[in-house]
Amino acid sequence: MTALAAGAPPKRSEAPADDPRSRRRRRAAVARRLLAVAPEAAAALDWEALDAAPGWLAMSDTDLMVLARQVGALLSAASIRLWIDGARIAAARTALGGPFLQALQALPEAQVLPRNVAPSPRIDSAEQVAPLLRTSGLAVLQASLSNATLRRAAASMLGNHASTMAPALAQSLVARAQTLVVRTPPPARTQGPANNKPTEGIKA
């Protein structure tokens, strides 16, 4: 019997939780999201798999694609930091958000993933920036799911093209991308010239 099927719930994970209420909320949000996109695969999940699910699996499509591009940018950071043409830099700013790109460019060299550690896409034009960062980021997100049942259920959202990267390294990249977002301040808001309302910041 599974956690999402009718009947008695299965054995829960024995791993302790620092905040059981937050864990239950996250688990329920992930379950709803996966049931919406892959009901048959999600029905095979048990409590242990849902407990191990990262919170980003409950994100909206828009927010998930932003995170994917940011994870892809961390994977390609060594190359992105060498860009000097305005077109690719502008495309990256739009895809990632200005504060994230600025923080990425300011990372100490020791925190940049070497290009020989994991394959990253070659991005030669501005038009390739967003789609290639998104695709490589989605592959890392899928590789970060060490639970095979959870990974199969998430494939409907992430695409069935997981990176060959080790789960621990993939998880580290995802965590670093999310930490970089937290550390960066939101874009400054300015007053519009006519209606005195804040203008919209750059959308990723």
Image (cartoon, grey):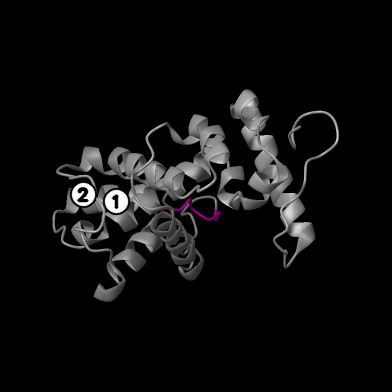
Q: CA distance from mark 2 to mark 1?
A: 6 Å
User: In the image shown, does 196 or 71 lie closer to the viewer?
Assistant: 71
Magenta segment, which residues?
196-201
User: In the image shown, does 167 or 174 lie closer to the viewer?
Assistant: 167
Marks 2 & 1, CB-CB < 8 Å contact = yes
User: In the image shown, does 105 or 167 lie closer to the viewer?
Assistant: 167
Q: Which image quarter is the N terminus in? A: top right
Give above or below for 86 relative to 125.
Answer: below
User: Which residue, given by chain and number where applicable, does mark 1 sit on?
Assistant: 92
Q: Residues within 10 Å of mark 2 (few under 14, many from 20)?
A: many
Name the residue: 48% across, 50% down: 200
Name the residue: 50% across, 59% down: 191
Q: Is residue 204 something one can see in this rendering?
A: no
Residue 49: x and y in percent read: 64, 45
Callout 1: SS: helix
Kindly identify which numbered label has been placed on residue 88: 2
